[in-house]
Amino acid sequence: MCLTSTNRIIGDQVIKTATARTNWIALCKAFAIVAASVFAFSSAAQAEESGLSIVASVQNQTIDDGVATKNPVSGVSIAITTSTGSMVGEGVTDSSGTVTISVPSKDSYVVTIDVSTLPDDVTLIDESKTQATIEKDSFTTNSKRVTFFAGSSTATGAPLVDRLAQRLVDGVRLGLIIAISSVGLSLIFGTTGLTNFAHGEMVTFGGLIAFWFNVLLGVPLLIAAPLVIALGGVLGLAMNAIIFAKLRKRGIGLISQLVVSVGLSIMLRNMYLYQFGGRTRPLDDFSLQVAKRFGPVSITMRDLTTAIISLIVLVLVALYLQRSRTGKAIRAVSDNPDLASSTGIDTQKIIRIVWFAGGALAAMGGLFRGLDEQVGFEMGSRLIFLMFAGITLGGLGSAYGALIGGFFVGVLVELASLVVPAELKNAPALLILIIVLVVRPQGILGRKQRIG
Amino acid sequence: MDIIKILENTVAALFGIDAAYFALAAIGLNVQFGYTGLLNFGQAAFMACGAYGLGMTTQYFGVGLWWGILIGLVFVVILGLLVGIPTLRLRADYLAIVTIAMAEIVRLVVRSVRFKEYFGGSDGINGFSRSFRDLSPFNPAAQYGIRPFRYSGYSFWTIIVGWSLVALFSLLVFMLMKSPWGRVVKAIREDEDAVRSLGKNVYSYKMQSLIIGGAIGMFSGMIFALDRGSVQPDNYSRDVTFYILTALVLGGVAKVRGSVVGPMMFWALYVFSDNFLRELTKNQPFEVFGFGLIQKSQVGPVNYMLIGLGLMLLMTFRPQGVFGSKEEMALDGR
């Protein structure tokens, strides 16, 4: 690709002429000027007069006695794409750890670092942040700077209490998303006995539909969100009506139904891959956020809002189950389907309601997760294991159990990342799963007779 | 479209190395799922035990290839105890959840940067298969067999070893299931409480079954690693277990011939579908009424979609597969 080679040459030239100690602003200007002059000759019509560039920098941060030193990391591949995914340019960082890539216009871009090109002993501080999103409005000058920090941990310099507080906040956010997503999983198990391995795909569905509305159709997210949640419910209804209601009618055993849900999960996940592709992409709205600091903790307004909404929804779900007629019927069916139907409850109707509500809540979880991280075809199936850990901890089949267990698992996973490497932070969830099954297999709120 | 070529590849896939290592894994899974009713969704982790046991011999311990089997077995037993102790007293779906979680954790650990010095990170381990190659009586440069079964010397060697292991373990499992031990595990599948009331230690039998099935799966991982000449963590993802399960259900659970013929049919169907779709989309996207349906890059996902759909349809309409019998299936929740 011609862009790559020119950029590499630019990088080398600048390093030869400017000494390594040149300060950044001068360097950026030099990059911008050289880039502009080179692109004046290029055939890319748009790039001719833009002179805009994105400077990506990779810095390895080491901390000795509380003093942070930054060392540039060279030879790392950086790619820039538009928000819809088409390639704009790519390059490799030079000995100052930076690479300048020209962009045609002031627009939204995604800067992706290729982690596999990092040196073996260097990892990103936050391994999930391999992409940075640049908004149209953030081009205040002609060049926009993006820095990827490598090193041991985000806040190694900060005192443990502060790091604990930050992790706690992140954990609460993750926990709320897991709790919302797994209510349906637990209720479906309670009312039908099905362990639904395709529930993760219901979460992904929410994220992908949100992406479809927001990015491809340009519908503002605030308008799209109710539609996303409703469609998630419809997906749940459809899964019940087309597949699982029929299986129950045919008298097919629960283990067979479980294996069918595995097949469904494989099929849906690959349908998403087929339609959406393998990359993760951000939603358009609310993607650029400035974190606000509250004491030792920083959180963006978007994340704060989604956390508060999740909390309200969870309280409403709990109240609904506790107080309303339908809620009581759901709990009755969960408890004992035969007894419930003999008291005149329409079991099939309750099951349909549960599938709808479960699908809607899962889609909502997917939407929030998509805002929090990014949207991808595997976003839900990565969570399913945490959801299972959560509902097992809370008690399989118990709705309140899913709320409490999911929340607790989210908090624990984030807190654990203080101790275990970020790439293994899901492992403690398995530990909980095993400990719970040994000590109290029915979970916190489950009843004993359901297990044996 | 080159029909002959597609058909040749399909027939070759029946006896290829992929079918062989799938068959080994399926024989193991059959001991657990088919005969004992244990829903092990982490067979990929047991395969990884074998592959990494083998890979670590020369790389880190500096011992011969045969030690790989011992190291792998140690891994299998540790893993089996770890997932078995908390779950085997409980209902089947707990085992499913824990094994799938365990398989995922195993994959994350072996590909992590933290444990790179032991497991090689995402690059995996290479260069351990030399002494296995040296055992080969065939000339690596020559071609053996007739079309479409035509292999280079080394592939021919792994295929022969792979299918010999399949034959060996088929025989072993067949005899095991005729033995008193086999009758007990089959009885556990049918009615656990009845077996318990006869004074048998159900928990212990289930654990033995889990570990025996895992150990057979371990050999599958070894054959796979030897064929590729490398161990890659992402080859042991959870979907691999599900594909093996699909192949087993296709052949028929609780039947030895089902666990061997199932994987052969699975690979033949897969290779046929893959080759067919690739031929179809080679020059331009496959279109129906001008509506682009499948592009070249989408062939992979479409294949896997078909596998998922196939598993659903099989489980719904013919859960006994080709050879199985409906009476012999542990299908109600226990």
Image: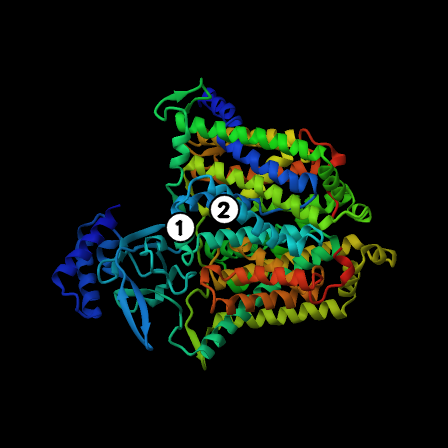
Whether labels 2 and 1 share one chain: yes
**Looking at the picture, how far across and down is residue A62, in whole percent?**
32, 69
**Looking at the picture, how far across and down is residue B258, in whole percent?**
64, 31
**Looking at the picture, how far across and down is residue B304, in whole percent?**
53, 39
Q: Relative to A394, is B121 above or below?
A: above
For label 2, the residue is B71
In the image, what residue occupies the spot 31% across and 52% down? A88
Query: Could one spot residue A44 in this view of the protein?
Result: no
**Looking at the picture, how far across and down is residue B131, in whole percent?**
39, 35
Q: Nearer the viewer, mark 2 or mark 1?
A: 2
For label 1, the residue is B120
Q: Which mark is residue B250?
A: none
- Amino acid type at circle 1 is Gly
- Amino acid type at circle 2 is Ile
Residue A276 horizontal side relative to residue B216, left or right: left
Q: Nearer the viewer, residue A282 or B185?
A: B185
Q: Secondary structure at mark 1?
A: loop
Q: Relative to A338, is A398 above or below?
A: below
Q: Disc 2 versus disc 1: distance between alpha carbons?
A: 17 Å
- The residue sitting at the bottom extreme is A295
Q: Are marks 2 and 1 in contact (CB under 8 Å)?
A: no
Q: Quadrant of the C terminus of chain A?
A: bottom right
In the image, what residue occupies the spot 53% across and 49% down? B75
Residue B220 horizontal side relative to residue A38, left or right: right
Q: Secondary structure at mark 2?
A: helix
Q: How many marks?
A: 2
Q: What chain does badge 2 belong to?
A: B
Earlier residue among tags 2 and 1? 2
Query: Could one spot residue B327 in this view of the protein?
Result: yes
Q: Quadrant of the N terminus of chain A?
A: top left
Q: What chain does badge 1 belong to?
A: B
